[in-house]
Amino acid sequence: MKIINKKNIVSVVCITYTSISITLAVLEVIAKGKMNPTQLNMFLCLLLSILGVLILSQHYRLERFSPLAMVIIQYVIAVAVILISLKAASYITDIHPDGYRDMILSFSIPYFIGAVVYYISLMLEVRKQNRILENIKKDRK
């Protein structure tokens, strides 16, 4: 039995790379006792990725809405979390005047690309499952 195959090799490489990169960055921060801007960017990118994935993974809770409304609601929730987080961070550190705009842009572009890929994949998977169900129904008759 092969654990790594043609279908999951990209995912395995991405997970491995991310795990190693984050581990090395954490160890470097611990060893040096401070975080440099590149490490901060990497951790921020990780947090934004987690936020995007968590938001997209909750699509089933919004199935009663149209797909467009679902995407808009998810995006508004994500941006609200980002803005609230930035506001909270502004009490600890100074935020650049363009920081709010820059964070929203840094999140929005990859989020919409990811959302398109996610919802197309979801739609294809639903179609595949529907075909399987139709075949099962035909075989029963």
Image (tube, rainbow, N blue to C red):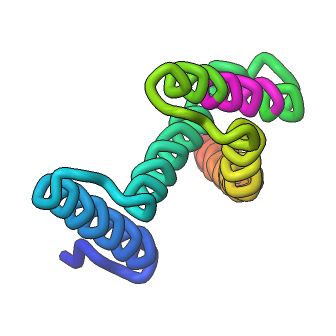
Horizontally, residue 33 falls left or right of residue 113, namely: left
Judge whether 93 appears above or below 103 on screen. Answer: above
Residue at x 24% of width, y 68% of height: 20
Judge whether 141 appears above or below 25 on screen. Answer: above
Percent position of residue 16, x then y = 29, 70
* Residue located farthest toward the bottom when viewing the structure as drawn: 6
57 or 140, which lies in front? 57
Occupied quadrant, residue 70: top right
Residue at x 63% of width, y 26% of height: 60
Confirm whether the magenta stretch covers residue 79.
Answer: yes
Horizontally, residue 7 falls left or right of residue 48, namely: left
Occupied quadrant, residue 69: top right
4 or 36, which lies in front? 36
Q: Can residue 101 be seen by looking at this rendering?
A: yes
Horizontally, residue 69 falls left or right of residue 4, namely: right
Residue at x 76% of width, y 49% of height: 105
Judge whether 34 appears above or below 55 on screen. Answer: below
Confirm whether the magenta stretch covers residue 7.
Answer: no
Per the rendered image, the range of residues in magenta is 72-82
Percent position of residue 73, x then y = 78, 24
Q: Can residue 135 be seen by looking at this rendering?
A: no
* Residue located farthest toward the front when viewing the structure as drawn: 94
Q: Say which quadrant the C terminus sits in.
A: top right
**Count of labels shown?**
0
Residue at x 71% of width, y 21% of height: 62
Horizontally, residue 80 falls left or right of residue 40, namely: right
Judge whether 5 appears above or below 125 on screen. Answer: below
Percent position of residue 79, x then y = 70, 30
